[in-house]
Image (cartoon, helix red, strand yellow):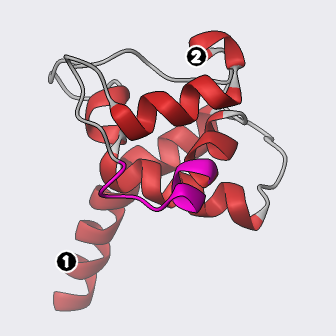
């Protein structure tokens, strides 16, 4: 009985990520840098920049490879310095980690 409950809770927690992967279809495999960026994005950015599947509101714009005109330098600066409505992450992430997030964003349509 406990094993079934554990499996159910795991599947329940994984459902949003599985739905996202399914929605992206047969997306190409990500490079290590992009995978790091996806992990960091999911930990720190997703909560505001992704529309939840529940009734919760989306707090910030969806991000993609076209955000800020797709300019890598502009994306790096925006993530590092923030804006009046978004905190900067230059003390939270190393420059290489910000670069990884930008590399991941370049994979999102």
Q: Report x, y in % for residue 62.
A: 44, 19
Q: Specify whether residue 96 is painted magenta.
A: yes
Give me the residue at 36% from left, 28% from top.
Answer: 49
Q: Quadrant of residue 56?
A: top left
Work out whether residue 1 can be spotted.
Answer: no
As rendered, which of 20 and 59 lies closer to the eye? 59
Drawn side of residue 31 relative to residue 5, left or right: right
Give the residue pinned by disc 1: 5
Tell me the quadrant of the picture where the N terminus can be found: bottom left
Question: Where are the magenta residues, as a range?
Answer: 90-99
**Does residue 47 lie above or below 14 as drawn?**
above
- SS of the residue under disc 1: helix
Give me the C-alpha separation between circle 2 and circle 1: 41 Å
Tell me the quadrant of the picture where the C terminus can be found: top right
**Does residue 78 lie above or below 66 as drawn?**
below
Q: Specify whether residue 89 is painted magenta.
A: no
Work out whether residue 26 can be spotted.
Answer: yes
Q: Residues within 10 Å of mark 1 (few under 14, many from 20)?
A: few
As rendered, which of 48 and 67 lies closer to the eye? 67
Q: Report x, y in % for residue 91.
A: 30, 56
Outermost residue, bottom direction? 2
Disc on res. 67: 2
Which is closer to the viewer, label 2 or label 1? Answer: 2
Q: Report x, y in % for residue 16.
A: 38, 45
Drawn side of residue 48 relative to residue 35, left or right: left
As rendered, which of 84 and 28 lies closer to the eye? 84
Outermost residue, top direction? 69
Q: Quadrant of residue 26?
A: top right
Drawn side of residue 25 relative to residue 17, left or right: right
Q: Residues within 10 Å of mark 2 (few under 14, many from 20)?
A: some
């Amino acid at each position: 009985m406990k094993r079934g409950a554990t499996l159910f809770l795991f599947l329940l927690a994984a459902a949003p990520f599985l739905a996202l992967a399914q929605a992206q279809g047969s997306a190409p495999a990500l490079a290590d840098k992009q995978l790091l960026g996806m992990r960091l994005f999911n930990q720190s950015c997703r909560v505001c920049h992704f529309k939840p599947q529940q009734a919760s509101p989306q707090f910030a714009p969806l991000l993609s490879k076209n955000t800020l005109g797709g300019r890598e330098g502009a994306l790096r600066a925006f993530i590092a310095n923030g804006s009046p409505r978004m905190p900067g992450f230059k003390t939270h992430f190393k420059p290489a980690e910000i670069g990884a997030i930008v590399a991941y964003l370049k994979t999102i349509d």
